[in-house]
Image (cartoon, helix red, strand yellow):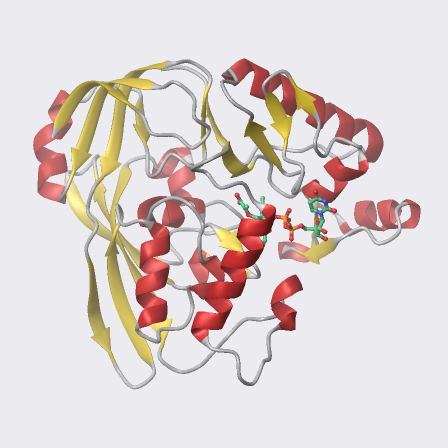
Amino acid sequence: MVFHNRHITNTFGLEAVADTYIEYRSGDELRRDLPQAKEPFLHVGGGSNLLFLQPRFAGTVFHNAIDTVEIVSEDASVCLVRAGGGMIWDDFVAWCVTRGLYGAENLSLIPGEVGAAAVQNIGAYGAEAKDIIERVEAYDINGGVKVCLSCEECQYGYRSSLFKREEGWRYFVLSVVFRLSKVRRLNLEYGALKDLDKETATLQQVRQKVIEIRQEKLPDPERIGSAGSFFMNPVVPESKYEALAREYDGMPHYPAADGMVKLSAGWMIDRCGLKGAVRGRAGVYDRQALVLVNLGGATASEIMTLAEEVIAAVKEKFDVTLHPEVQIIKKG
Ligand code: EPU
């Protein structure tokens, strides 16, 4: 279905209107409507990771509205589940937990939709979407055909994938097939999840715990505008981490790919004294410094000015450059 001048939902609560907006419920619908699309193209899920610098997007926004979920196959230990790219991510997690399927529970309550989860490789509490993605079913606009990309072909990394790179823009995610375990297998290594009893914790308890932590630390997108973590956690060489650790006691750090070390941007912003900082109608969230918030009626430029201040402060104090995790839409 093609719309014109349609509002683009975004959790930052900024004004954003698309010249052309195509919502599709199947690959065939997408094929039918594509000739009416004009570039630039932008895929939008729940709009929970976007910052629109301009109120008008003078190209085409695509929204996948396929929200069905079904079991593809199962045996005694594994269940393959296909979820439409337009399904609300947390509805998918709840669906899995209710059916006793293990693997998605640590990713409870992350805002957004299934398709965007596969594009961004969302992650939280020691789990990433890629850990349970079997394959992604997409429409290739170059060939005009439906294709299946294995998890490996999606080239997943920390908050990155093929779909976020230039060569991946040709693929429009239709649905995602997840590999879930029917056998009890929980990942309770991360921070507050360690409180749960490894032997007896149930899927529901893990989901509940994750929901509690998120509700305590992160703003409710229904009440406070934000896009979750504004920055990615920076990944630095081990020598850089060691130099910082000598200076800053207890600096949180996590192993990353290729012997690199992931630092905690929230911790660094906090140590710069910026947690809770308010600049006009934009702020650094007072319970989690990695999140920038719209305190009510903020403009995109107020948020960007604050983001630049944060980047400069962290660079000055730690000599580490932060990069946005949020997708910044510069022009239409
Ligand atoms: N910390 C502070 N002060 C703060 C924030 C954090 O000292 O203001 C410290 C914490 O005490 C902890 C460390 O920094 O030692 C890490 O904090 P946290 O566990 O809250 O996680 P994060 O690294 O800040 C990442 C993800 C979140 C995800 C959490 C939990 C990114 C960009 N963000 O945040 O994802 O929920 O881990 O796994 O990787 C998102 O992507 O939008 C998002 C919310």
- Please name whichever residue, 241 or 288, is drawn nearer the observer in this view of the structure: 288
Would residue 9 appear left or right of 202 to someone viewing this image?
left
Residue at 34%, 83% in the rendered image: 77
Q: Can you give x and y, in whole percent of width and height, for residue 128 in the image?
A: 49, 57
Would residue 166 appear left or right of 175 to someone viewing this image?
right
Q: Can you give x and y, in whole percent of width and height, for residue 239 in the image?
A: 82, 49
5 versus 128 height, above or below: above
Q: Can you give x and y, in whole percent of width and height, for residue 217 in the image?
A: 60, 48
Would residue 285 appear left or right of 42 to someone viewing this image?
right
225 versus 161 height, above or below: above
Residue at 38%, 41% in the rendered image: 163
Residue at 13%, 21% in the rendered image: 36
- Please name whichever residue, 311 or 27, is drawn nearer the observer in this view of the structure: 311
Number of dots carrying numbers: 0
Quarter-wise, where is residue 6 in the image? top left
Position of the N terminus by quadrant: top left
Position of the C terminus by quadrant: top left
Residue at 56%, 85% in the rendered image: 199
267 versus 257 height, above or below: above
- Please name whichever residue, 241 or 270, is drawn nearer the observer in this view of the structure: 270
Quarter-wise, where is residue 195 in the image? bottom right
Q: Can you give x and y, in whole percent of width and height, for residue 60 in the image?
A: 25, 22
